[in-house]
Amino acid sequence: ISFCLNEAKTEGKSELIPSIKFRHSCLLRNQRCIAAYLYDRLLRIRALRWEYGSVLPTAIRFHMCAEEMEWFNQYKKSLATYMRSLGGEEGLDITQDMKPPKSLYIQVRCLKDHGEFEIDDGTVILLKKNSQHFLPRWKCEQLIRQGVLEHVIS
């Protein structure tokens, strides 16, 4: 801006100075708006990791640019590294139990074929479409967020 102002003063075009200052303030405002928009978008992408887990649905990935996907993947890796550093050998999944559970086991219905699913005691359960199971909440919460299972409220 100072270059434009000095040039206008030396050429005797001082009537342009208010226009130059106005244009500059508009550019600064637009820059702040873009920064706020991008920051809000980043916060929303970060929230997607907590809502859907490490794998985003195709419909959401379709609306993200390559840089946003790269940022999501980097955030996912950073979060995984942090979770591995917690809770001893296996780490601690802090994305589980986003809401305090009312019971440790819940009734779920499978919305699509998912294949075999192993729970803590070594039991393998076949998750087929429309099958219902009584499972530990923390083991199936991720699948509920991904749309594989739904919580059956009786």
Image: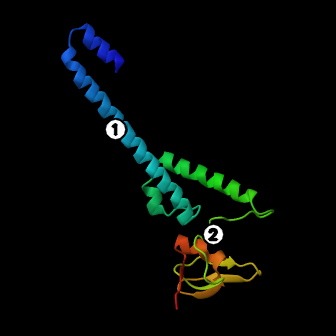
Amino acid under disc 1 = Asn
Which residue does the numbered mark 2 point to in the structure image?
A: 96
- How packed mark 2 is, by other alpha carbons closer than 10 Å (few <14, some 14-19, many 20 or more), is some
- The residue furthest left is 15
Q: Residue at x 43, y 46 (%)?
A: 38
Q: Which mark is residue 30?
A: 1
Query: Where is residue 55, by image quadrant?
Result: bottom right
In three-dimensional space, the C-alpha distance between marks 2 and 1, rounded to whole angstroms, equals 40 Å
Q: Residue at x 54, y 65 (%)?
A: 52
Q: How is the image coloured?
A: rainbow
Q: Locate residue 64, reporting x and y percent.
A: 45, 52
Q: Locate residue 148, reporting x and y percent.
A: 54, 75
- How packed mark 1 is, by other alpha carbons closer than 10 Å (few <14, some 14-19, many 20 or more), is few
Mark 2 element type: loop
Indicate whether 140 appears above or below 64: below
Ranked by sequence position, the earlier of labels 2 and 1 is 1
